[in-house]
Image (cartoon, rainbow, N blue to C red):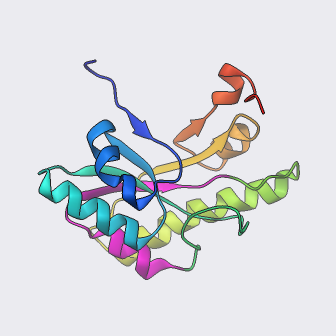
């Protein structure tokens, strides 16, 4: 369908990279250097450049994927990959009702984008994907450029 961008959202297993690149236009959750390298190699063989977001675990929750906020050098390696177009960062806020904890996670992501942009003059990360149905207002206040509001649109998932 013309004008439709298909975004892969969620944890991508490295053995699914080829299929993912064939089916989707962007990958929104590159969570390791190893995954970035696999995507880069496969995209190169297909003569494609894949827009991506780096997933950052700003809440520190062990069940979540993503780079730790202090893994600056690893993130810059991903940004420098020839067949990736890293356009920004994404995070999922902490599972809590505590609005200050949620805000802190989003502020970390926004500040990290600034750090990465300052570390490498060629780096221009513009996207901040943060905020879902329960916390999108805080995310917007903290500079989110993308929110995920599936639950607000479609209702809660069935268990």
- The residue located at (34%, 60%) in the rendering is 124
| Side of 76 where 139 appears, left or right | right
Q: Residue at x 22, y 58 (%)?
A: 42
Please state which of residues 109 and 57 is positioned toward the viewer in this rendering. Answer: 57
Q: x%, y% of residue 154?
A: 67, 20
Magenta segment includes 159: no
Q: Quadrant of residue 7?
A: top left
Vertical comparison of 150 with 1: above or below = below
Quarter of the image where the N terminus is located: top left
The outermost residue toward the top is 1
For residue 27, say whether it is visible: yes
- Rendered position, 15 above or below 142: below
Residue 116: quarter of image: bottom left
Report the residue at 20% width, 65% height from top: 82
Q: Is residue 50 above or below residue 158?
A: below
Label tally: 0
The quarter of the image holding the C terminus is top right
Residue 156 locus on image (x, y percent): 75, 28
Residue 56 drawn at (x, y percent)? 56, 63
Which of the 4 quarters of the picture holds residue 109?
A: bottom right
58 above or below 4? below
Is residue 151 rendered to the left or right of residue 50? right
In this rendered view, identify the residue nearer to me: 59 or 118: 59
Q: Residue lying farthest front?
A: 15
What span is colored magenta in the figure?
A: 71-92
Which one is in front, 77 or 106? 77
**How far across and how far down the image is residue 30, in percent?**
44, 59
């Amino acid at each position: 369908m013309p004008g439709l961008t298909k975004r892969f959202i969620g944890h991508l297993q490295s053995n699914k990279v080829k299929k993912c690149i064939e089916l989707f236009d962007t990958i929104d959750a590159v969570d390791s250097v190893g995954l970035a390298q696999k995507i880069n190699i496969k995209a190169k063989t297909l003569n494609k450049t894949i827009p991506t977001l780096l997933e950052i675990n700003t809440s520190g929750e062990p069940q979540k994927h993503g780079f730790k906020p202090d893994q600056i050098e690893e993130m810059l390696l991903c940004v420098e990959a020839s067949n990736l177009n890293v356009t920004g960062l994404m995070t999922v806020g902490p599972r809590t009702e505590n609005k200050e904890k949620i805000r802190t996670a989003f502020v970390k992501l926004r500040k990290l984008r600034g750090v990465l942009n300052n570390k490498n003059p060629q780096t221009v990360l513009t996207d901040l994907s943060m905020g879902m149905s329960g916390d999108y207002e805080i995310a917007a206040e903290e500079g989110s450029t993308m929110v995920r509001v599936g639950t607000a649109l479609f209702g809660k998932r069935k268990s």
